[in-house]
Amino acid sequence: MATSTILTAATTLGRRNVLATSGMVLVMVFVAFALFAPWIAPQSPFAIDLPSRLQPPSAAHWFGTDELGRDILSRIVYGARISMLVGSSVVAGSLLLGLVFGSIAGYYGRFADRFFNIVVMNAFLSFPGILLAIAFVAFLGPGIFNLILALCIGGWVGYARLVRGQVLAVKEKEFVEAARALGASDWRIVTRHILPNIIQPVIVQAAIGMAGAVLAEATMSFLGLGVPPPTASWGSMLNDARLHLFDAPHMVFFPAAAVMLAVLSFNFIGDALRDYMDPRSRIAAGL
């Protein structure tokens, strides 16, 4: 049901919303970069060629070269792997934690709601998520697994708050009361009756969350807390380009453009999904 809803929404959005179409095309491009990087990249992203360092864009190097003579286009293509992997993993992990804790707090209420909502969630919300991620990675050391885990720890609260609110609104509906009267277990009620009816706003939040996860990964890599070199990452490329902002501006422009386009594409898709899944917005837009 959820898969068919997403496909229907994507098809309709592609026909009616230019920004959503652009976002989906860009996402498909970045996913293709991530999956087929060895075949798409014109050169090895690790090949050092010091005589060709800091070259501007040319026929040999479409996006120019960095301070070690590495091809920037190839590194951007390979950097999409890190961004898409970290972004999707962070959203999946945060969404899973948010569904579990939000469902428990919203369904059982009382002590469970007070504990998870007032104590746990507020404790996490009292610190900016990026600071929690920085502290976690600084303690455990850089690495893709530690980075994903740190961003999940800082990002699950938003999903939990959303799920809790939706569960509170749905659990008193007649069909839930009917399932409870028929002797359905709490697990069955939550998984078969409540979650399918609250999945739409969660999907919208996940789409927008992908943009935040990609930006957070770039931020962490820029600070030197992402994947270690020589692995190509858009954030680490921007960090390397700081010292060459004026003599080689192409080193800053192309990685920054990749981050910007990735974030914009997911935001376009999330906004369009929100408009499509909201009946009032859909009527106003004529969808």
Image (cartoon, rainbow, N blue to C red):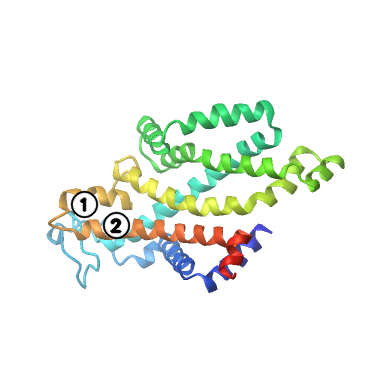
Could you say where residue 27 lies in the image, as x and y percent from the top left? 45, 63
Could you say where residue 71 lies in the image, as x and y percent from the top left? 24, 61
Alpha-carbon neighbours of circle 1 within 10 Å: few (<14), some, or many (≥20)? many
Horizontal relation, residue 167 to residue 150: left or right: right
Give the CA separation, mark 2 to mark 1: 9 Å
- In the figure, residue 279 lies in which quadrant? bottom right
- Residue 232 shows up from this direction: no
Q: How many marks on residues?
A: 2
Question: Which of marks 1 and 2 precedes in the sequence?
Answer: 1
Could you say where residue 135 lies in the image, as x and y percent from the top left? 37, 31
- Quickly name the residue at label 1: 241
Q: Is residue 182 above or below residue 125?
A: below
- Residue 54 shows up from this direction: yes
Q: 83 or 167, which lies in front?
A: 167
Kindly identify the residue that appears in the image at 47 percent across and 33 percent down.
125
User: Could you tell me which quadrant the C terminus lies in?
Assistant: bottom right
Q: Amino acid at mark 1?
A: Ala
Kindly identify the residue that appears in the image at 49 percent across and 61 percent down.
269
Q: 110 or 61, which lies in front?
A: 110
- Quickly name the residue at label 2: 255
Kindly identify the residue that appears in the image at 38 percent across and 40 percent down.
143
Q: Which mark is residue 131?
A: none
Is the residue under label 1 in contact with that under label 2 (CB below 8 Å)?
yes
